Image: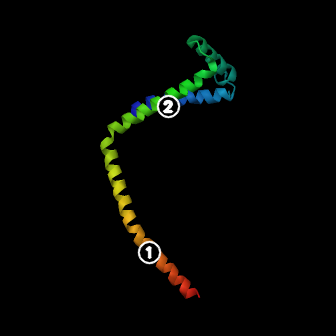
Amino acid sequence: MRSFLIFWAGPLSFLWGWYFLSYYDLSMGMYFFSREMHDLVFTIYGNILGIAPDSIPPLVARACIVDTGLVLCLIAFRRRKQIIAWVKVFRANRAAAARTKPAAAANAALAYSKELSSAS
C-alpha cells in the first residue's frame, strides 16, 4: 500500500510542482521551469488534442481530483474495519460527553453564582 501511495503521489507532486513553477516563471536558471517551456508544452498538447491550450490545466486538475478520490476510496475500503471501529468509539465518546455536559454546566453555573454572592 505504501508503494502504491508513493507511485501515486510522486507523479502528482512532480506534475503540479512543475506546473506552478513554470506558470509563475520560477525557472531558477533552468529552461525546464520557464514560462516559455510551459506555453510550449500546453501548445503541443492543445494541438494534439485539438482543444485550446488554456483549457488543458482545468481538465488535468479535474482528473487528478477524481483519481485522488478513487485512491482514497480504495484506502478506505481496505481499512473499513478500522474506520468502523474508530467511528463507534467516536460516537460513544460524544454520547458520553453529551450526557455529562448538562451536569457540568449546572455545576459551573452554581459555582459562578456562589462567586457572585460572595463578592457582594
Q: Residue at x 34, y 37 (%)?
A: 77
**Residue 71 in sight here:** yes
Residue 95 versus residue 71 in the image, above or below: below
Q: Quadrant of residue 52?
A: top right
- Residue 67 image point, x, y percent: 45, 29
Could you give the CA–CA distance between mark 2 and mark 1, rounded to whole angstroms?
A: 48 Å
Residue 47 versus residue 108 in the image, above or below: above
Query: Are the residues at dot 2 and dot 1 in contact (C-beta closer than 8 Å)?
Result: no
Give whichever of 43, 32 is nearer the camera.
43
Q: Name the residue type under label 1.
A: Ala
Q: Residue at x 40, y 72 (%)?
A: 103
Q: Look at discs 2 and 1 and give the one toward the viewer.
A: 1
Secondary structure of the residue carrying tag 1 is: helix
Near mark 1 (Cα within 10 A), the count class, few <14, some 14-19 or many ≥20, is few
* Residue to which mark 1 is pinned: 106
**Which quadrant is home to the C terminus?**
bottom right
- Residue 22 image point, x, y percent: 65, 26
**Which quadrant is home to the N terminus?**
top left
Q: Quadrant of residue 32?
A: top right
Q: Residue at x 68, y 23 (%)?
A: 35
Secondary structure of the residue carrying tag 2 is: helix
* Residue to which mark 2 is pinned: 65
Q: Is residue 26 left or right of residue 67?
A: right
Which numbered dot is residue 36?
A: none
Q: Is residue 26 left or right of residue 68?
A: right
Give whichever of 48, 7 is nearer the camera.
48
How is the structure coloured here?
Answer: rainbow
Q: Quadrant of residue 59?
A: top right
- Residue 51 image point, x, y percent: 59, 15
Q: Name the residue type under label 2.
A: Ile
- Residue 92 image point, x, y percent: 33, 57
Q: Residue at x 50, y 26 (%)?
A: 63
